[in-house]
Amino acid sequence: GAVVSQHPSWVICKSGTSVKIECRSLDFQATTMFWYRQFPKQSLMLMATSNEGSKATYEQGVEKDKFLINHASLTLSTLTVTSAHPEDSSFYICSAGSGRAYNEQFFGPGTRLTVL
Amino acid sequence: GQNIDQPTEMTATEGAIVQINCTYQTSGFNGLFWYQQHAGEAPTFLSYNVLDGLEEKGRFSSFLSRSKGYSYLLLKELQMKDSASYLCAALDSNYQLIWGAGTKLIIKP
């Protein structure tokens, strides 16, 4: 159990375009989903926390108008990178909270974004 | 500020034992996680400690000392597939995960 999927696995886009990444919890309901970004040889950086039915909470330094997060249902959250630039190229990972007291997170497989 | 420290890289031999240390400073504490991350993949859960002591799970064990702000992950009978980064993450008083930069473990035959 506790499977999280992400789509697409990788995407290449032109500078200035927008890219949408989907995160789904396949066999459980996730009231909270987390979006991370990871640059090579660096740790995960939390971008935002999204709660179903409400606005996402963004970490300091993350532009909410550039990284649009929608958590429309208990099994789906989306991250849209708007007007992507080469510096947005990164590994984007979502995770879904297990709902247990200790907040274990189950990670999606990640999306590799390359902006040309 | 909140901080997690772990070594950047370690090397060990197949079949041997390796201990990866992690020290943490957080605003409150609600437990410590260890995750394994292979290159180009998302992290996978290994262990969670909230009480002092050693938790054993097969070849992997995790230890926590809350008074010292210290944890370690112990890997026994190392296999080549254990080559990965190992991430230490502490849960603060707001139940936010504070991540370490990860320890890259290289296993040599």
Image (cartoon, rainbow, N blue to C red):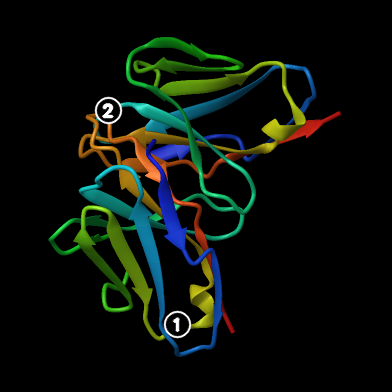
Q: Which mark is residue B30?
A: 2
* Three-letter code for the amino acid on which mark 1 is drawn: Ala
Which mark lies nearer to you, 2 or 1? Answer: 1
Secondary structure of the residue carrying tag 2 is loop
Secondary structure of the residue carrying tag 1 is loop
Query: Dot 1 falls on which chain?
Result: A
| Residue at image location 53% in from the left, 72% down from the top | A89
| Residue B67 to residue A12: above or below | above
Which image quarter holds the C terminus of chain B?
top right
User: Looking at the picture, how far across and down is residue B11, in whole percent?
Assistant: 75, 31
Near-viewer residue (B54 or A1) = A1
| Residue at image location 72% in from the left, 22% down from the top | B78
Q: Which mark is residue B48?
A: none
Which image quarter holds the N terminus of chain B?
top left
**Res. B43 visible in picture:** yes
Q: From the viewer's perspective, tell me whether residue A109 is left or right of residue B78.
A: left
Q: From the viewer's perspective, tell me whether residue A27 is left or right of residue B35.
A: left
Q: Quadrant of residue B47?
A: top left
User: Looking at the picture, how far across and down is residue A76, in whole percent?
Assistant: 29, 59
Q: Which mark is residue A84?
A: 1
**Res. A93 visible in picture:** no
